[in-house]
Amino acid sequence: MPGNIQSIERAAAILRLLSGRNRRLGVVDISGELGLPKGTVHGLLRTLQHVGFVEQDPETGKYRLGAALLHMGSSYLDGNELRTRALNWSDSLAARTQEAVRIGTLHDGQVLIVHHVFRPDDSYQTLDVGSLLPAHATALGKVLLAHHPYVAAELARKGMVSYTDQTICDLERLERELEHVRERGWAAEYGELSPSQVSLAAPIMDRRGLTVGAMAIFGPPERLLAARAPRGELLTHVREAAQSVSRELGAIPW
Amino acid sequence: MPGNIQSIERAAAILRLLSGRNRRLGVVDISGELGLPKGTVHGLLRTLQHVGFVEQDPETGKYRLGAALLHMGSSYLDGNELRTRALNWSDSLAARTQEAVRIGTLHDGQVLIVHHVFRPDDSYQTLDVGSLLPAHATALGKVLLAHHPYVAAELARKGMVSYTDQTICDLERLERELEHVRERGWAAEYGELSPSQVSLAAPIMDRRGLTVGAMAIFGPPERLLAARAPRGELLTHVREAAQSVSRELGAIPW
DNA sequence: ACCCGCGTACGACATTGTCAAACTCAGTTT
DNA sequence: AAACTGAGTTTGACAATGTCGTACGCGGGT
């Protein structure tokens, strides 16, 4: 791994900071957090501002993410094959199951939502495309982790946060769970991220047979479950939809 | 203009290229387009890849935007005050008018969509948050240009693209139109971007009285217009919604 | 088999970014 | 009022840093 460009890595670290703490940060906040001199951080920020990646609040002088990132994020979606191919299938999955659908992929040990179809009723729901969800507490994440053992190991090393009393925080339990997922070809999550939400997910594979994403429905347990287990017909729909997308991506339907 | 960091500017130029129409580019494409040596571009790309801003197609070796940008784009939205404050009002505007709502702000001489509420029916619509729309061919853009004369002048210098036979491409006509917009406090667009779409927009102002965004409804002419002019009640709804958001942003309601 | 074009690696050079210290300006405290 | 903090910003010398030309390896055309 021959040299990476220092200033770009630092700039990226700044952007990551700004996107993590969803708030505005000042020069000294950043310089403290990154262990860099004030002046250096300021120079980086000035350039980032010049290219539209950060903006500065003219009143407080603090910095926040810039508008250029929004456009680039949406450009990423346009070029994302997983999402493009999954568009139709996720719509019809939502229609068939009458539940909300999410498509996610692994990013930095978390689940990045690349597509989201609202539950087909008129309730207010917030779009969470671009959100990062914890892998060990979502059905999407379990499917993805099950086929990326290295990421799973990394996750275990860092420790798993507990979100509800159902969250799996124990490495061995998670490993057993992932083993099940690999055997069955689908994953479930029972209120492990949010107490009143459960989800069911299945893997999406590309032409090489790699699991490049996952597709899930999520909603209240009383609708997704029967006798504390996933309703069979919903599960079938999810698995078929994910398989259809896989086929579109060139996976051998074995 | 004290020194900007070269490598970051170049990296941003690469990302801008990748977010343009050409979704996948090779090292030589980029190096040709930017007039930089191959090796330099490769170094930049390697670092951008390392920080997750670009990804490389393992088959073709070509580069495309990376997933990290998606998450940062959505983080930008979370911190965007204009959008946050406008959430409720845009929902109710959509409900009242039964039309789709868009909120936009000026970015690089174009209109960046920061929020989008679907028309409240079950038709398939694609979310265009993050899209860049031409300013001279949208009601949103006209409102924004009307209060940013410098940007308007810049736009005129670069020339205006024609999208339909209704598109205003003449500088003088545009100037007259913007003058109207300033007087009336709202803008309309009659099939100037897409033949079967019209839109109505009103400005959103912040506490300093600056126009920081605009709010619009858009849809087919037969629903938005009466006798080739905007329906009065729709116009009122749009203007009131925009004014409500302005108030939330601290604008003096004069 | 050959060539062309691609993505990638290497290494010398000097351009470039880095860093610490100094500056400006508000808001607070003395 | 004056001094003091703590913010963001500017500066300029140094050398670490990124740049650029050249060279390598590989694959797909022909």
Image (tube, coloured by chain):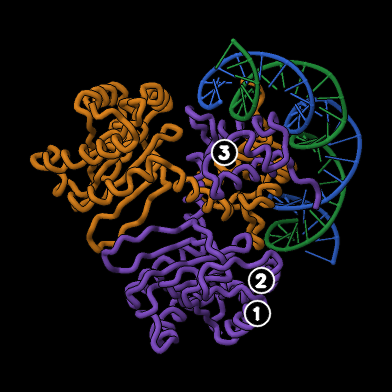
Chain colours: A orange, B purple, C green, D blue
What kind of residue is marked 2? Ala
Q: Give coordinates of residue B183: x percent, y percent.
A: 59, 87
With B191 as the anchor, is A4 left or right in this view?
Answer: right
What kind of residue is marked 3? Leu
Which residue bears the numbered disc 1? B175
State yes or no: discs 2 and 1 in contact (Cβ < 8 Å).
yes
User: Closest to the observer: B96 or C24?
Assistant: B96
Question: What subunit carries mark 3?
Answer: B
- Marks 1 and 3 belong to one chain: yes
Which residue bears the numbered disc 2? B152
Instruction: In the rendered view, tell whether residue B29 sits above or below residue A182.
Output: below
User: Closest to the observer: D4 or A169?
Assistant: A169
Question: What subunit carries mark 2?
Answer: B
| Circle 1 SS class | helix
Q: Give coordinates of residue C17: x percent, y percent.
A: 74, 37
State yes or no: discs 3 and 2 in contact (Cβ < 8 Å).
no
Q: Residues within 10 Å of mark 1 (few under 14, many from 20)?
A: some
Which residue bears the numbered disc 3? B25
Q: Distance between the Cα atoms at labels 1 and 3?
A: 39 Å
Q: Distance between the Cα atoms at labels 2 and 1?
A: 9 Å
| Circle 2 SS class | helix
Give the quarter of the image for residue A139.
top left
Give the total of numbered labels: 3
What kind of residue is marked 1? Glu
* N-term mark: 2 or 1: 2
Question: What subunit carries mark 1?
Answer: B
**Which residue is drawn at the image coordinates 69% and 44% (left, top)?**
B9
Q: Distance between the Cα atoms at labels 3 and 2?
A: 32 Å
